[in-house]
Image (cartoon, helix red, strand yellow):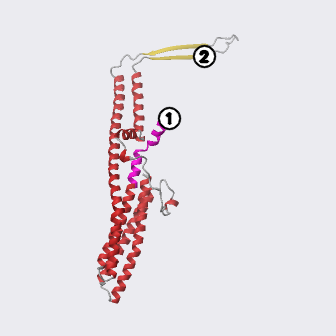
């Protein structure tokens, strides 16, 4: 949870940095179009100026939305971090969460062993053990209960000054459960039912953990494919397209609307690529949650 909040804050902060960077470029484009329109030497039209100013306003709106998201993510961290730290920008460099194991190659038996040792499952096992103790105690009510009482009494001398012997008393009591068919049977059956109910809870919890785990593994595989596509193909193509449309416009061989669309598409692709990387880190952090028992299992094997 803490890692996810921090990553979402980092996502918003880096998106703001990307937009601020391109915002300066859009401002330059506005100056170029205004100069071209004023000189009447190029093909710049008034609608080109309006379009460039409109896109700059849209970027301002995005910055406000991202600032809200950044503040919300930081406030989510307020219960763990002091406000003095949260008021500062996040570090631009961070160590991405590393997978605790090779999740894609983890076989089913290893997965079940890992999930069964998860803290949430261990907590259920402790509840089951407590219920078994209750069953054992309930069954004890069938057995005779033996009690021993002992008392000691000190006696002072009598009025004549003669000493008197102290008193020592010993008593034994036996509680015989003569009527066990009703109340005691109900107690035992209730204790057994409670224990079985928790066993059912354990099976349901294990199925839930497995379902969530396989969902995260599947998403990790797909998001890694998208990350490879963006980094190796899409981002370079977007950059080439933006530069080509700008070159064509400066030679009066292209439309300003093409320049704007290309630049906006490139900016959106950069933000998408950032989101993909952050989502990948979040998924790995979630998968590490399911492998939280890995260290304890390794220690147990070493000690064994």
- Residue 283 shown in magenta: yes
Looking at the image, the residue that sits furthest to the right is: 161
Marked residue nearer the N-terminal end (2 or 1): 2
Q: Secondary structure at mark 1?
A: helix
Horizontal relation, residue 256 to residue 74: left or right: left
What residue is at 32 percent from the left and 69 percent from the top? Answer: 265
Rendered location of residue 251, percent (x, y): 33, 82
Q: Nearer the viewer, residue 21 or 88?
A: 21
Q: Which mark is residue 214?
A: none
Residue density around tag 2, few if under 14, some if 14–19, many if 20 or more, within 10 Å: few
- Residue 15 shown in magenta: no
Question: Pointer 2 and pointer 1: residues touching (CB < 8 Å)?
Answer: no
The answer to whether residue 252 is above or below residue 223 is below
Q: Nearer the viewer, residue 130 or 42?
A: 42
- The label nearer to you, 2 versus 1, is 1
Q: Which mark is residue 153?
A: 2
Q: Nearer the viewer, residue 203 or 173?
A: 203
| Start-end of magenta stretch | 281-304
Q: Secondary structure at mark 2?
A: strand
Residue density around tag 1, few if under 14, some if 14–19, many if 20 or more, within 10 Å: few
What's the magenta bit mostly, secondary-structure-wise?
Answer: helix
Distance CA(mark 2)–CA(mark 1)? 57 Å
Rendered location of residue 5, percent (x, y): 42, 56
What residue is at 37 percent from the left and 65 percent from the top? Answer: 271
Rendered location of residue 119, percent (x, y): 43, 41
Residue 74, by quadrant, is: bottom left
Q: Which mark is residue 303?
A: 1
Horizontal relation, residue 204 to residue 165: left or right: left
Residue 178, by quadrant, is: top left
């Amino acid at each position: 949870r803490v890692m996810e909040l921090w990553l979402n804050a980092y996502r918003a902060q880096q998106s703001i940095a990307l937009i601020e960077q391109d915002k300066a470029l859009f401002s330059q484009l506005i100056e170029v179009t205004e100069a071209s329109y004023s000189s009447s030497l190029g093909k710049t039209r008034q609608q080109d100026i309006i379009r460039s100013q409109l896109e700059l306003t849209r970027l301002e709106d995005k910055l406000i939305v991202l600032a809200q998201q950044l503040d919300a993510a930081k406030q989510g961290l307020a219960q763990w971090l002091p406000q003095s730290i949260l008021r500062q920008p996040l570090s631009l460099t961070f160590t991405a969460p590393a997978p605790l194991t090779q999740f894609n190659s983890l076989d089913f038996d290893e997965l079940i062993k890992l999930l069964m040792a998860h803290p949430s499952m261990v907590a259920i096992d402790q509840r089951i053990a407590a219920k078994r103790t209750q069953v054992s105690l309930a069954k004890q009510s069938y057995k005779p209960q033996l009690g021993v009482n002992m008392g000691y009494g000190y006696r002072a001398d009598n009025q004549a000054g003669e000493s008197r012997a102290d008193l020592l008393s010993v008593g034994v009591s036996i509680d015989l459960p003569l009527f066990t068919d009703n109340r005691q049977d109900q107690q035992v059956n209730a204790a057994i039912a409670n224990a079985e109910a928790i066993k059912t809870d354990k099976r349901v919890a294990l199925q839930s953990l497995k379902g969530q785990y396989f969902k995260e593994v599947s998403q990790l595989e797909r998001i890694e494919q998208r990350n490879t596509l963006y980094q190796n193909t899409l981002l370079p193509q977007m950059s080439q397209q933006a530069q080509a449309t700008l070159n064509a416009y400066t030679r009066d061989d292209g439309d300003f609307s093409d320049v704007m669309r290309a630049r906006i598409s490139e900016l959106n692709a950069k933000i998408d690529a950032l989101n993909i990387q952050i989502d990948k880190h979040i998924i790995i952090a979630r998968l590490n949650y399911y492998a939280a028992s890995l260290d304890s299992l390794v220690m147990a094997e070493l000690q064994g």
